[in-house]
């Protein structure tokens, strides 16, 4: 038997290959409807024989699956194909590590944004005490940071990875608590600016206590983000 193309019936759920099928949508091959094969939205290249629909089953040339890491050897004597999916597992693991690293890098960025807001509030209080009032859109600064935080919370990928990587939710919870503290600080800062209030010792004690708690939460979140980012980057390069 001449070696041309080996056709394999593949379970899509196992090989993570998306298939779009419709009657003659992509043309026909020897009387069979051609099936377009994609992997994560990217179309796989077609060689001399395309994937087809045959007797209600999707038949994919096994050499096409080289593009997603499937390797194989052909035993012509025994008419047997030995499929090796180890590369697929490696590719998927590497991709997952990179996605996780990206999430933690984004979490670090959110933490740094919250840190800047906290620092601006501190500078404002200090300047007010020295009769040097600062003018800034404090509400806008905090809202921008909150929007960045909410984007992470609402992100479908972050939610999915949060089910198996608990540090993601730990960091988000720390940031959420720090945001509530910053909202309280914002009310104080705006009142100071509006009334030209000069802080007394008691005010400083209360503000500093809350500020230290806020900064500790933000620092804990950013440091954990940095640690986990380095961890997953290291895994992705192995």
Image (cartoon, rainbow, N blue to C red):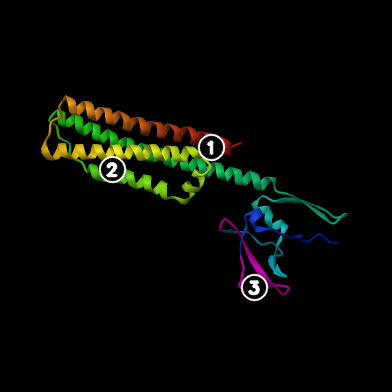
Of residues 129 and 185, the one drawn nearer to the viewer in this rendering: 185
Quadrant in the picture for residue 112: top left
Residue segment shown in magenta? 20-41
Q: CA distance from mark 1 to mark 3?
A: 43 Å
Under circle 1, the secondary element is: helix
Quadrant in the picture for residue 116: top left
Q: Are marks 1 and 2 in contact (CB under 8 Å)?
A: no
Task: Give the number of the disc on residue 27.
Answer: 3
Under circle 3, the secondary element is: loop
Q: Residues within 10 Å of mark 3 (few under 14, many from 20)?
A: some
Residue position for label 1: 233
Q: Position of residue 230 (x, y in %)?
A: 50, 34
- Horizontal side of residue 168 vs 17, given as left or right: left
Residue position for label 2: 142
* Of pointers 1 and 3, the one earlier in the residue sequence: 3
Q: Position of residue 136 (x, y in %)?
A: 20, 41
- Horizontal side of residue 38 vs 209, given as left or right: right
Q: Residues within 10 Å of mark 1 (few under 14, many from 20)?
A: some
Q: Is residue 77 above or below residue 116?
A: below
Q: Position of residue 83 (x, y in %)?
A: 75, 51
Mark 1 or 2: in front is 2
- Horizontal side of residue 25 vs 190, given as left or right: right
Of residues 34 and 93, the one drawn nearer to the viewer in this rendering: 93
């Amino acid at each position: 038997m001449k070696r041309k193309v080996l056709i394999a019936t593949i379970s899509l759920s196992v090989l993570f290959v998306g298939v779009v099928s419709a009657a003659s949508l992509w043309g026909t091959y020897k009387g069979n409807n051609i099936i377009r094969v994609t992997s994560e939205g990217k179309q796989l290249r077609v060689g001399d024989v395309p994937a087809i629909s045959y007797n209600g089953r999707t038949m994919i040339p096994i050499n096409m699956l080289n593009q997603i890491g499937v390797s194989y050897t052909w035993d012509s004597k025994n008419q047997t194909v030995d499929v090796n999916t180890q590369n697929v597992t490696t590719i998927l693991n590497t991709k997952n590590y990179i996605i996780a690293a990206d999430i933690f890098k984004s979490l670090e960025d959110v933490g740094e944004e919250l840190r800047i807001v906290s620092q601006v509030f501190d500078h404002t209080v200090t300047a007010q005490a020295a009769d040097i009032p600062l003018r800034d859109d404090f509400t806008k600064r905090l809202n921008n940071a909150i929007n960045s935080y909410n984007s992470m919370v609402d992100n479908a990928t972050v939610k999915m990875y949060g089910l198996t990587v608990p540090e993601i939710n730990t960091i988000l919870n720390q940031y959420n608590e720090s945001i509530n503290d910053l909202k309280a600080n914002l009310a104080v800062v705006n009142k100071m600016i509006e009334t030209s209030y000069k802080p007394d010792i008691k005010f400083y004690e209360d503000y500093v206590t809350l500020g230290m708690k806020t900064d500790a939460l933000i620092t804990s979140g950013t440091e954990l983000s940095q640690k986990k980012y380095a961890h997953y980057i290291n895994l992705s390069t192995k």
